[in-house]
Each structure stands twice: as structure tokens, then as C-alpha cells.
Image (tube, rainbow, N blue to C red):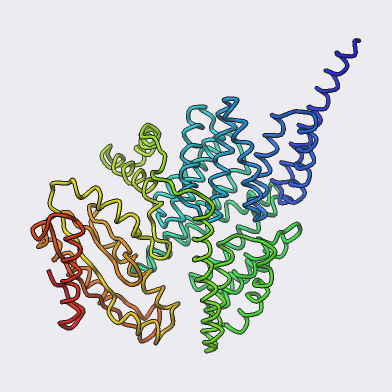
């Protein structure tokens, strides 16, 4: 055998061995041992680079991104997955690029970058469809479902998550089926929490019971395949669902089972365990017991974890202190909670150049609509869901994190479009009456919950053609299709809904009203002029006694 032939044989043997080791790493990552998986994949990556095996290196980078997600090292994961995407794209490997972009989107969402996450997830799904690969389709569809969930759109999240589970089952992928079932349960729980805010206890109970059942299915699979990471997620989520149903003993039983799977756990898992335990104690009124796990969770913050873990820890800690009547530390914890959002926003601005538009292709969403039409009673209903999904993906960059409504940036973009529209429209300015007193008398945390509840009420009361925007602070703007008279009637309905809302669910003694000013195209031509007149009418509403509509 010639030397060159021997070298080829050795290279092939090395590649086979490396691929076998990479499969071993994946098995570790699928059985709750992602730190070991990350270490092994890292060694394979170094060796692949040394041998010039760029394809194997790209596969290592792709898998490492997932392990980094599991253990809460999102920024490290981004470094690897970006390299992988460049390789797969250069060599036209759509399936692999789709998987890498789906992981990229998930990691971006972890870092509080929803607009980039949407872009990557949409590209991933488009590539997966072009490759006709159900595994990549399952992964990308799941990530889009999570984006809907995080944007408080549980109905759409459920549709996408169900589809991802179906795809996982169609190829017999137990890991994907387990993981996506966990997310499907989470989407149902979000629906339950929204139903509770809307005063719909039966719907809340139904959604949370469904969430428990789906998560139990996922737990059975996790135990079957030996995935301790997924088992911990399942038990932590079930504990939260039981606690929201008032079944605190069952919640604590779940947390006791959680401890049985803590071998090979990570900082992120430990944080989730601690803040979930704190949340359960808070919900059951045991604020003293809540402090210990929450303070332990605070000590772990510097060791890593996700942005979501950070805010949850300080939110529950502020609630525990408030329940104990220790208002100074409660306020300090709540400031940390607020500062997390502010810091995340500032860091997000530094990490990216703002996208002018979100990338998506109408063809992709038409294909989604064809799938979802099987669930709809008519083709028209399916098309409406398509339009709503497209609108959400295109506008998620414009969402306000606290209220779930559109933000000021979105209003600016709509004003540019309204300048050229010839159809009549109206603008309402809404302001929470005596909001400063709410913050002073009840705490800024309660004030935030008031604003969040108002966002929920506005979404539930407005028509499909209307759009609600958080203008800033306690001020909101609503864009109505049609003349001011009809808009004034709708605003009166909004005013009444907020006045009649059961605010005692947030805090005893709390009562909230709003004042509204309305103007339309009969009063002025440009959107800014109409807004100014609506603002004047808002001032008149406040001056004449508040809790009223002036048009």
C-alpha cells in the first residue's frame, strides 16, 4: 500500500472515530449530561480543526450550541453556531443550516433579542421546508412556537408546538417529542394565566389541567430515555402549574421528586428549582419559607443562568419581602427586577444593529396555513390565522415587554403608513388616573402589574382592526378604524371594562380608572395633528373629573 493510500485510510478512520465520539456526545446531551457532552464535543472540535475537517467542525459547533442552551451559556453557544451557519450556508446544506439557525434563534430569544430570534427561526423553517426534512422542520417549528409563547400568544404557540410534536413522532424522535411536549404544556399554561387575568376561572383550570397532562407525558418519556435534564424541567413546570391551581402540597411533592433527578444538574437548573420553590411558598402565603431558596438563588446569579431566571428570582424575592411587610428590601429587589429589563435593553442595542423589517416569506406561511386548515372549520378561518401569524412575526420587534402591546416604535411606523391612507381613522389617548398614587400607595411592583393588566384588557376588548400601543409610562394610544363617533363608543366600553375590573386580585383596596381623549380624520389630516387633538381631549377629560371619555 502506498503512503498516500495509508494516509487516506488513516483519515477515514479518524473521521469515523470522531463521528462516533460526536454521537456519544449527543447521547450525553440527550440524557441530561450536557456538561460532559460539551466537553467531549469541544475536544472533537479541536481535533477536527487540526485535521482540517471543516464539516465535522461545523457539526460540532451546531451540537455545542444546543448543549450551551441546556446549561444556560447562551452567549458561548452563539459563538459556535454562527460559525456553523457560515459553513452550512457556504456549502448549500439546507437541512444542517436549518437546524443551526433554529438553535441560533432559540439562543437569541434566551438573550432577550426577540426580533433577531424571529428572523432566524423563520429562515430556519423556510430552509427546512425546502430541504423537506421533518427533523429540521420539527425543530424550527418548535422555536417559532416558543416565540409565540414568549409574546403571550398561547393559541398560536399551541398550534405550532402541536405541529412540532407531530413531526417528532412521525420520525420516532423521542428526545424531540419529549422536549416539544414540555413547550406545548408551557403554552397551555400561558393560556391559563391569561384566562385568569381575564376573570375566566373555568378556562384557566382547563388550560392548566391540560398543561399538567402534556407535561406528564413528557416526564414519562424523559424517564424512559433517561433524560434527567428534561425530567427536571417537567417537574419544575408541574410544580408551578399545581401551585397556580392552589394545590400547593402537590406542587411541593413535585419539587421533592425534582431532587431525585439533580445529578448532573447545572446552574440554570438549580436556579429554576430554587425560584420555583420560592414561588410555591409565596403562592401559599409562606413568605418566610420562600426567602431561603430565593436568597440562595440570588447567590447563583453571578455563576450564570438565563435572563429569564434573573428576573424571576428578583420578582419572587420582592413578593416574599412584601408579604412579610419588609417593604424596603421588597423595593430593592423590585428595583433589581426593573434594572434587569433596562440593562437587557441597553445590552441588546449594543449587540445588534436594529432590523428595519423582519424577514419572512409569504410562501412559507401559506404552507403553514394549508397544514392548519385541517384544524379550521373553513378555509377563511385558516387564512385569518395565517394573517395573524404573519402579522405577529412581522411586528414582534415592536412589542412592549411589560404589557405585550405594541410600543412607541411601532406607532412611529404606523404614522408613516397612515399619512398616505385615505380611509377614515381615529386615535385615542388613554392615561391611568392617579397612577403616581398607585405607585406611592401600593408599590411600583403593583403599578407594573396594573399596566400589564390594562394591556390584557385592551387586547380582549378591541376589534381585530384596532391596535393598542403603550405610548410611555402609564399612557396608551389606540388606533381605531373609522370615524371618532364609533371610536368614542368603543373607548367608553374600554373605560367601563377597566373600572369594573376586579383589581383586588392584584392588591386589596386597589381601584383603577382611566381617562380617554379621542380625535379622528374629521378634525385634522396628519396622524400627529390628530394625536395632538386627542391629547388635548385627554387633558379635558382629566380636568373635568377623570374616568371619562372626551371626543
Residue 346 in the image: state x and y as whole percent: 50, 61
Q: Position of residue 310 (x, y in %)?
A: 58, 66
> Farthest bottom residue?
325
Q: Residue at x 40, y 49 (%)?
A: 156
Q: Please identify the quarter of the rendering in which residue 454 is found.
A: bottom left
* Picture quadrant where residue 403 is located: bottom left
Residue 418, percent from left and from top: 21, 50
82 or 513, which lies in front?
A: 82
Residue 43 appears left or right of 305:
right
Report the residue that reaches farthest toward the top.
Answer: 1
Q: Is residue 75 left or right of residue 539?
A: right
In this rendering, position of residue 379 left or right of residue 142: left
- Which quadrant of the rendered structure holds the N terminus? top right
- Vertically, is 419 above or below 248? above
Q: Quadrant of the C terminus?
A: bottom left
Residue shown at 35%/87% (left/top)? 509
Q: For the point 59% across and 69% down, which residue is it?
A: 276
Residue drawn at x 63%, y 36% as measured from the top left: 84
Amino acid at each position: 500500500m502506498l503512503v498516500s493510500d495509508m494516509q487516506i485510510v488513516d483519515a477515514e478512520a479518524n473521521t469515523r472515530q470522531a463521528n462516533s465520539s460526536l454521537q456519544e456526545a449527543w447521547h450525553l446531551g440527550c440524557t441530561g449530561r450536557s456538561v460532559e457532552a460539551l466537553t467531549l464535543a469541544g475536544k472533537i472540535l479541536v481535533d477536527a480543526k487540526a485535521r482540517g475537517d471543516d464539516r465535522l467542525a461545523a457539526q460540532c459547533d451546531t451540537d455545542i450550541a444546543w448543549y450551551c442552551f441546556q446549561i444556560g451559556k447562551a452567549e458561548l453557544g452563539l459563538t459556535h453556531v454562527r460559525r456553523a451557519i457560515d459553513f452550512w450556508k457556504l456549502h448549500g446544506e439546507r437541512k444542517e443550516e436549518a437546524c443551526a439557525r433554529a438553535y441560533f434563534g432559540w439562543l437569541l430569544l434566551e438573550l432577550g433579542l426577540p426580533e433577531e430570534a424571529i428572523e432566524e427561526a423563520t429562515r430556519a423553517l423556510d430552509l427546512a421546508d425546502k430541504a423537506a426534512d421533518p427533523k429540521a422542520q420539527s425543530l424550527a417549528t418548535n422555536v417559532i412556537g416558543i416565540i409565540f409563547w414568549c409574546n403571550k400568544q398561547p393559541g398560536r404557540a399551541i398550534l405550532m408546538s402541536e405541529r412540532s410534536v407531530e413531526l417528532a413522532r412521525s420520525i420516532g424522535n423521542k428526545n424531540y417529542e419529549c422536549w416539544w411536549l414540555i413547550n406545548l404544556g408551557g403554552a397551555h399554561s400561558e393560556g391559563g394565566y391569561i384566562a385568569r387575568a381575564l376573570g375566566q376561572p373555568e378556562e384557566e383550570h382547563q388550560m392548566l389541567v391540560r398543561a399538567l397532562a402534556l407535561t406528564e407525558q413528557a416526564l414519562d418519556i424523559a424517564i424512559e430515555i433517561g433524560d434527567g435534564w428534561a425530567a427536571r424541567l417537567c417537574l419544575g413546570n408541574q410544580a408551578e402549574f399545581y401551585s397556580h391551581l392552589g394545590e400547593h402540597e402537590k406542587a411541593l411533592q413535585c419539587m421533592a421528586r425534582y431532587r431525585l433527578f439533580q445529578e448532573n444538574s447545572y446552574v440554570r437548573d438549580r436556579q429554576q428549582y430554587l425560584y420555583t420553590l420560592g414561588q410555591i411558598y409565596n403562592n401559599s402565603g409562606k413568605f418566610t419559607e420562600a426567602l431561603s431558596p430565593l436568597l440562595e438563588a440570588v447567590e447563583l446569579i453571578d455563576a450564570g443562568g438565563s435572563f429569564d431566571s434573573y428576573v424571576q428570582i428578583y420578582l419572587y424575592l420582592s413578593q416574599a419581602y412584601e408579604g412579610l411587610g419588609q417593604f424596603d428590601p421588597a423595593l430593592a429587589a423590585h428595583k433589581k427586577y426593573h434594572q434587569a429589563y433596562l440593562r437587557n435593553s441597553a445590552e441588546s442595542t449594543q449587540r445588534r444593529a436594529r432590523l428595519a423589517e423582519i424577514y419572512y416569506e409569504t410562501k412559507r406561511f401559506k404552507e403553514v396555513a394549508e397544514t392548519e386548515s385541517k384544524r379550521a372549520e373553513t378555509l377563511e378561518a385558516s387564512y385569518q390565522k395565517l394573517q395573524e401569524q404573519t402579522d405577529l412575526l412581522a411586528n414582534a420587534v415592536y412589542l412592549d415587554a411589560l404589557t405585550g402591546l405594541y410600543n412607541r416604535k411601532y406607532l412611529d411606523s404606523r404614522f408613516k403608513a397612515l399619512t398616505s391612507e385615505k380611509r377614515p381613522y381615529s386615535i385615542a389617548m388613554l392615561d391611568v388616573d392617579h397612577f403616581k398614587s398607585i405607585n406611592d400607595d401600593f408599590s411600583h411592583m403593583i403599578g407594573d402589574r396594573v399596566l400589564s393588566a390594562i394591556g390584557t384588557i385592551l387586547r380582549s376588548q378591541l376589534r381585530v382592526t384596532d391596535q393598542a400601543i403603550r405610548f410611555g409610562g402609564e399612557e396608551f394610544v389606540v388606533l381605531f378604524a373609522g370615524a371618532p363617533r364609533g371610536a368614542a363608543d368603543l373607548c367608553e366600553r374600554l373605560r367601563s371594562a377597566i373600572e369594573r375590573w376586579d383589581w383586588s386580585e392584584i392588591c386589596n383596596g386597589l381601584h383603577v380608572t382611566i381617562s380617554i381623549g379621542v380625535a379622528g380624520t374629521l378634525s385634522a389630516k396628519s396622524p400627529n395633528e390628530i394625536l395632538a387633538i386627542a391629547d388635548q381631549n385627554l387633558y379635558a377629560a382629566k380636568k373635568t373629573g377623570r374616568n371619562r371619555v372626551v371626543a
